[in-house]
Image (cartoon, rainbow, N blue to C red):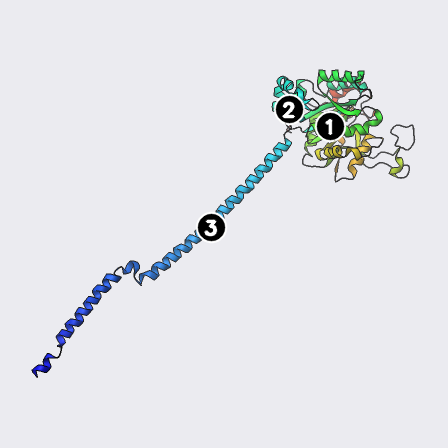
Amino acid sequence: MKNRSKGKISPLCIFILCFFSFALGMFFSKRIWAPTESVGEIAFPRRYNQETKFSCDDCETKKIQEEDMLGEFSKAHEAIRSLDSSIAKIRFEMPSTKTFLGTKEMEDLPTMITADTERIGIRRKPFVVIGINTAFSGRRRRDSIRETWMPQGEKLLRLEQEKGIVVRFMIGHSAISNSILDRAVDLEDAQHKDILRLDHIEGYHELSAKTKDFFATAVANWDAEFYVKVDDDVHVNLGTLAATLARHRLKSMVYIGCMKSGPVLNRKNVKYHEPEFWKFGDPGNKYFRHATGQIYAISRDLAKYIAINRPILHKYANEDVSLGAWLIGLEVEHIDDRSMCCGTPPECEWKAQSGKVCVASFEWSCSGICKSVQRIKHVHAKCGENAATLWDSLL
């Protein structure tokens, strides 16, 4: 009995052994898995979900930020393009020194800058170039205009600087080089500095060619918004003319004047005879609508068109008909403005008193002011605009 009891393990020993094993297991388990809150199997999935959520939120935020950055970049890019466009436009519109000097030679530049630095320094882009058609025999007419509606000296310079209104008498050359007529005009220009010489041989029957030469020369010298041709026996109110043109400055292809449609004269030896009358249909037909030749205005694009295409533009006997023919096949807006063909006093006087000052005044019977040298001062006194109309105008 005693030997069999020695070969058995008592229940107490078994209990103690189990307890000790359990305790030892708990000890090792706690050593390895103690940070259950940070890396345990229960905590890990929770932290993983949070990190995934934060990661997704960060992705969304980053995506929004990237979109905002792209938007800002796009805006900046458009702003740069707009600025480049504006700079290019300004460079295009700024008159070059050569443009300003006009027909003066470039080698005279240092002398002219010394004598006229202020003029070159503050010159603005021209708004309108007005060419007064004149001839060698028109000295007295030119002087009568200088004494009435055309500013002189410093005022003429100020008109160009402050208002962008350029006014010049336009005249070509005689058939004989350096003739006494040419020298007289050169001396007159040296005195008044208001004459534009054209590369053109003067002659009454060459008015269509002279008109083309004027627009070509004016465009080459001044990049203006409008170009006006006016005869030297017409009275003009410059401020009212500028205000009239300003109403159409947003139109690129505009032709302004008193539109008419006169008869095509096929009989020889009559004034305004049209040798090519057969092109206009049967006898008794009328011309297409065009501005009367005493005064008219065209926009920059039309003047450039004439300048570029002048070798192939056909010339009719009458200059105003020729201009109408050059433009009739284009997308041009014809503006019939009757204030550009008022009669002389009392008509223009009545209109001025009623607040409707005329742009130009002349008499149809004379295609200008009859005896203009003697009478233009009277017309100016009765129909001339207030000085403030010109100098206070916003152009």
Between circles 2 and 1, the one closer to the viewer is 1
Mark seen at residue 217: 1
Could you tell which of marks 3 and 2 lies nearer the N-terminus? 3
Q: Residues within 10 Å of mark 2 (few under 14, many from 20)?
A: many
The answer to whether residue 337 is left or right of residue 81 is right
Instruction: Say which element carries label 3.
Output: helix
Quick check: can you spot residue 241? Answer: no
Q: Quadrant of residue 323?
A: top right
Most extreme residue toward the left, as rendered? 2
Residue 165 point in image, percent of width and height: 68, 26
Closer to the camera in the image, 140 or 181: 181
Mark seen at residue 45: none
Closer to the camera in the image, 66 or 346: 66
Mark seen at residue 64: 3
Label 3, label 1: how far apart the Cα atoms are: 59 Å
The answer to whether residue 35 is left or right of residue 9 is right
Which of the image's four quarters has the N terminus? Answer: bottom left
Residue 49 point in image, percent of width and height: 37, 59
Residue behind mark 2: 161
Residue 269 point in image, percent of width and height: 92, 27
The answer to whether residue 214 is left or right of residue 118 is right
The type of residue carrying mark 1 is: Thr
Rendered position, 109 above or below 71: above
Between circles 3 and 1, the one closer to the viewer is 1
Closer to the camera in the image, 115 or 336: 115
